[in-house]
Amino acid sequence: MSQFEQLMGASRPYLTDGGMETWLFFQQGFEAPEFAAIVLLDDERAREALRRYFAGFLELAQTQNTGFVLDTDTWRGCLEWAPKLGVSKDKLLELNADAVKFAKSIREEWADRVSPILVNGVVGPAGDGYRPGALPSATEAEAIHTPQIRVFAEEGVDMISAITMTNIGEATGIARAAKAAGLPVVISFTVETDGRLPTGDKLGEAIQAVDAATDGVPAYYMVNCAHPDHFRDAIANGEAWTNRIGGVRANASRLSHEELDVAEELDQGDPKEFGHLHGKLAQMLPSLKVFGGCCGTDLRHVGCVVESLQLQPAD
């Protein structure tokens, strides 16, 4: 049984990390264009910081006897971002490959303490994660994202996750590219304060549309980069599509994307409340299997989620 099959069949939740980029840039003082953690892989200080960062979450997974989904720092790894990051497309592909190797080295360090650890190739939007701008068709999106996804396949990731998806076409194209590469794929949509995608589509409609266009290729769906209050009403009726939601990586802040985009200070919210809200989400979404955080969250927030889920520590 593959590690991904173990995740899909697990009766116990898996953990993942929090807001990697906000931790690096707001809390640790690193700088990079376009919030692109991937370009920091050439900085040994940043690599050591990321090792410390993941060590905290992996220690939590160890004490709670859970599996762990270990992300690559490749949210800005799509080739469309190369000009804005000041690197060539070939260099960006090299950084994507290096990101997988780096994640694998962390897994190797922790493999005797946490199992399973899935290396998750993170795919971000080709456009802005808050303001999608021009919307690619599914065919265009498949072509745009295929180079990065092929690198992930060549480097042997266990799965990929399309994070902060703003529109149906791009999510569909990524799912198709993942299938062509032979990789399990998770699609994670972001929503605005009204529970709808930035394009105005309802969350449930987006999930159903991608499933229909791909014959159900995504292993499951997630919601990320939104506060639980922003999408609670969208899932409250318990419609059938909510069973497709297998993960949540929420923001600490209740601010809108527009407000967060111009914020000069990090809104870290209330970790205790954050954990409590996830306990409620777990009751509403019976298929939830992966818990972590997004913007403004760190180990404190995910620790409070664990407390709210009332997981029993390892023997």
Image (cartoon, grey):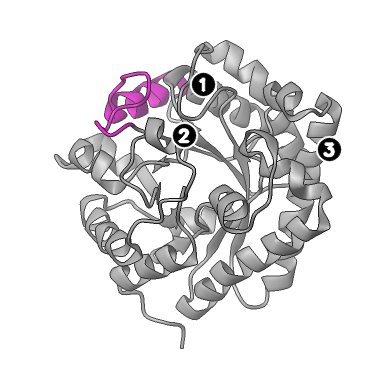
Q: What x and y, as percent, mark residue 294?
A: 46, 49
Q: Secondary structure at mark 2?
A: helix
Q: Residue furthest front?
A: 264
Decide: few, some or many residues near mark 2? Use Cα within 10 Å; few <14, some 14-19, many ≥20. Answer: few
Q: Is residue 148 left or right of residue 290?
A: right
Residue 294 in view, yes or no: no
Instruction: Say which mark, if any, is on residue 276.
Output: none
Residue under the point 67% across and 77% down:
112
Which quadrant of the rendered structure holds the N terminus? bottom right
Residue that badge 1 annotates: 170
Q: Is residue 213 left or right of residue 202?
A: right
Tell me the magenta residue range: 192-214
Q: Nearer the viewer, residue 43 or 99?
A: 43
Instruction: Say which mark, if any, is on residue 261.
Output: 2
Residue under the point 38% across and 52% down:
252
Q: Which callout, 3 or 1, points at the residue further toward the start of the chain?
A: 3
Q: Magenta segment: does it hold 206?
A: yes
